[in-house]
Image (cartoon, rainbow, N blue to C red):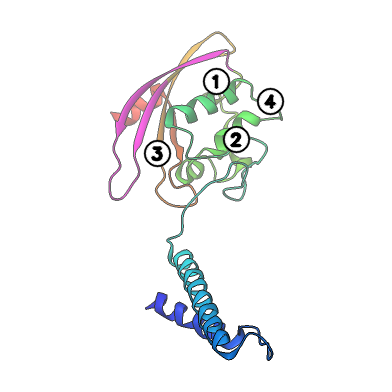
Amino acid sequence: RIYVACINCFLTWTSAHIDPPQNPGWPPASCKALESKSNKAEMNNASLLLALSICTNALRPPTCSRRRGVRRKAGEDDSVPQPDPIYSDEAVVALCMNALGRNDDPIPDAGLRTCWNFSSDMCRAAVGGSLADFLKYARNPTFAQLVDHESWSGKLGNRIPATITRGALTTTMVTVQTNRGQERKFLWTLQQQRRPPDQGCWLVHECLYVENAIEQTL
């Protein structure tokens, strides 16, 4: 019905506003009649195609897309990487860990700001709810071992498929050599988002020091 309404609208408009050129001398009336019919047929065909094109675009379902560098939510920092569906779960962990290893490059706390950008709403709420709160939280002795570390390695853990109510989950065990020469392990849990504006993006759901993670499972 929408298509028919659009077509009728365009045909009515073209009939009312576009007429073939008038020339009282030439061509003869018989030729003018044929030319008028031909021109009207061409105009009607063009109007029909235009109407169909406009209706098709109007009825096309909206698509969700992300563009790198576009601020996702208030409080994010555009000077460091942003969430994007092109990043796999493993890529997000690597991105955050590499950024934490050179925390003040290219700007102060760039590594922590990157982690904040890739944190889910639940993760953000757990560390204070704002970037300023997270920067304070990151100074605690446990999490601080991730900042400016010497090296790290990761081992992909479980992959839990998505359900009707949540996106897929994945875990990665990260082993860190701290800048004090100590070895520490952290369990990263990521979740794939199902809703805009982060649809399809992997975000950090949790990052737990292994000893704390074990305590929570007992």
Cα distance in 3D space between marks 1 and 2: 22 Å
Give me the residue at 59% from left, 25% from top.
Answer: 99
Q: For the residues carrying marks 4 and 3, which lies nearer the camera in this image?
A: 3
Is residue 176 at least partly visible in the picture? no
Is residue 134 rendered to the left or right of residue 202? Answer: right
The amino acid pointed to by label 4 is Asp
The 10 Å Cα crowd at callout 2, few under 14, some 14 to 19, many 20 or more, is many
Mark positioned earlier in the residue sequence (1 or 4)? 4
The amino acid pointed to by label 2 is Pro
Q: For the residues carrying marks 1 and 3, which lies nearer the camera in this image?
A: 3
**Residue 81 marker:** 2
Q: x, y (%) of residue 72?
A: 57, 48
Mark positioned earlier in the residue sequence (2 or 4)? 2
**Residue 104 marker:** 4
Mark positioned earlier in the residue sequence (4 or 3)? 4
Q: For the residues carrying marks 1 and 4, which lies nearer the camera in this image?
A: 4
Mark positioned earlier in the residue sequence (2 or 3)? 2
Describe the element under mark 1 as helix, strand or loop: helix
The amino acid pointed to by label 3 is Gln
The magenta segment? 149-173
Q: Main secondary structure of the magenta part?
A: strand
Circle 1/circle 2 CB separation < 8 Å: no
Q: For the residues carrying marks 2 and 3, which lies nearer the camera in this image?
A: 2
Residue highlighted by disc 3: 191
Cα distance in 3D space between marks 1 and 4: 15 Å
Cα distance in 3D space between marks 4 and 3: 27 Å
Q: x, y (%) of residue 201?
A: 46, 41
The relative height of residue 18 versus residue 188 in the rendered view (above or below) is below
Q: Quadrant of residue 32?
A: bottom right
